[in-house]
Amino acid sequence: MGTNLRIVQYGLGSIGCGIARRILGLPGCQLAGAIDVDPQKVGRDIGEVLGLERKLGAVVSADASVLRKVKAELVLHSTASHLKTVRPQLVDSIESGCSVISTCEELVYPNDGNRKIAEEIDRLAKRWGVAVLGIGVNPGFVMDALPLILTSVCQDVKKIKATRIVDASRRRLPLQKKIGAGISVREFEEGVSAGAIGHVGLRESANMIADALGWELDGIAENIEPVVARKGIQTQSLRVGEGMVAGIKQTVRCTVDGEEVMVLELQMRVDAEDPHDSVFIDGIPPVDMIIRGGIHGDSATIAIVINAIPRVLASKPGLITVRDLPILTCSRNLSGGDGARVSRFP
């Protein structure tokens, strides 16, 4: 085995392209290939698709057969939010002998509805001797892993509230559409009913926190409502008229023995005036943390995927979660020697 880790990027949307560009600047890693279903990308040089000024000498493939051709060792996967949708992609990657780090939200901490798929992925990963991780900023960090880290200084925890307010005007157009920006309240409600509008991941975060703290939840209630624009708003991608939907407010409330123990509130809107991430822990001692401006979801997702690489490579085979990993830190380098790779930290 060579000293460079052979990586294939699966999915070349905005996040996938960002991950791929980051790989190119990471010593110890080689972008050996890429996969996407978009006919406008398939067959083109990866460098062109990434918007580089040079070609990389490899083209975008339409399916996972490229994994065996390039002898890939790791797949960085960024295609869809739902586990049922990405299951074939994950299976193909695992059966090609690759470990996988995916931004699929439902993979971060699979719920009961995805138990069979999760068990299948875990079983296959162990059979092929690879590790599979779902990770991201939300879920995967700001509303689950971060609150759990903060509880490490508490003797007791009675209640957790995590709030994330995102200025969606600075985010990519697909996300603005996913939160209903620019449409009417009626269209928003129809989109929620159809599953086309709304954030995936709050229930996953809630279950991760509850399991880690030993809380047996007897209720998880989720509510999604529109945030209506009080004045006209123009972003780089779209215009939101007064009275139209500016974004979404999505809340999950969890109870134990009928008493509320957890509230996860997410607001993503193009008119957010005070974007921030906050965690309040009613405990002994209490913890009250706020990140002014909030963590930028896109760039941070790219970073956390890259920073998870050394931890995943060192993990035992199977489906793992962020709860199974040591604390992630910024990784500038991966190096290989005699099959061993060591994370080098700043």
Image (cartoon, grey):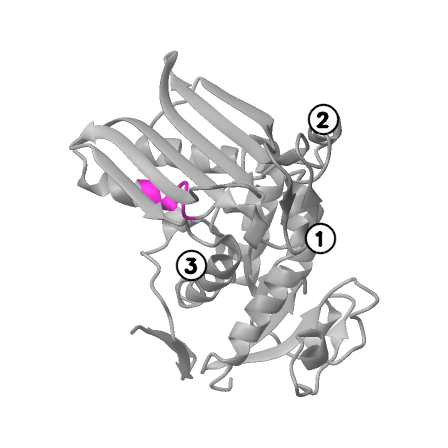
Which of the 4 image quadrants contains residue 228?
Answer: top right
Q: Residue at x 68, y 65 (%)?
A: 12
Which of the 4 image quadrants contains residue 271?
Answer: top right
- Give the answer, above or below, for where 128 lies relative to 287: below
Q: Residue 177: image x %, image y %?
A: 69, 44
Q: Is residue 145 left or right of residue 137?
A: left
Query: Disc 1 marks which residue?
Result: 88
The magenta segment: 141-147
Give the residue type at disc 2: Ser
Give the residue type at disc 3: Lys
Q: Residue at x 40, y 18 (%)?
A: 255
Q: Residue 58: image x %, image y %?
A: 71, 83
Which of the 4 image quadrants contains residue 342?
Answer: bottom left
Who comes first in sequence, dot 2 or dot 1? Answer: 1
- Which mark is nearer the camera, 3 or 1? 1
Local SS, label 1: helix
Who comes first in sequence, dot 3 or dot 2? Answer: 2
- Give the answer, above or below, for where 32 lies relative to 268: below
Q: Nearer the viewer, residue 135 or 224?
A: 224
Which circle marks residue 320 in the picture?
none
Query: Disc 3 marks which residue?
Result: 316
Which circle marks residue 193 in the picture?
2
Local SS, label 3: loop
Q: Is residue 288 magenta?
A: no
Q: Nearer the viewer, residue 286 or 340?
A: 286
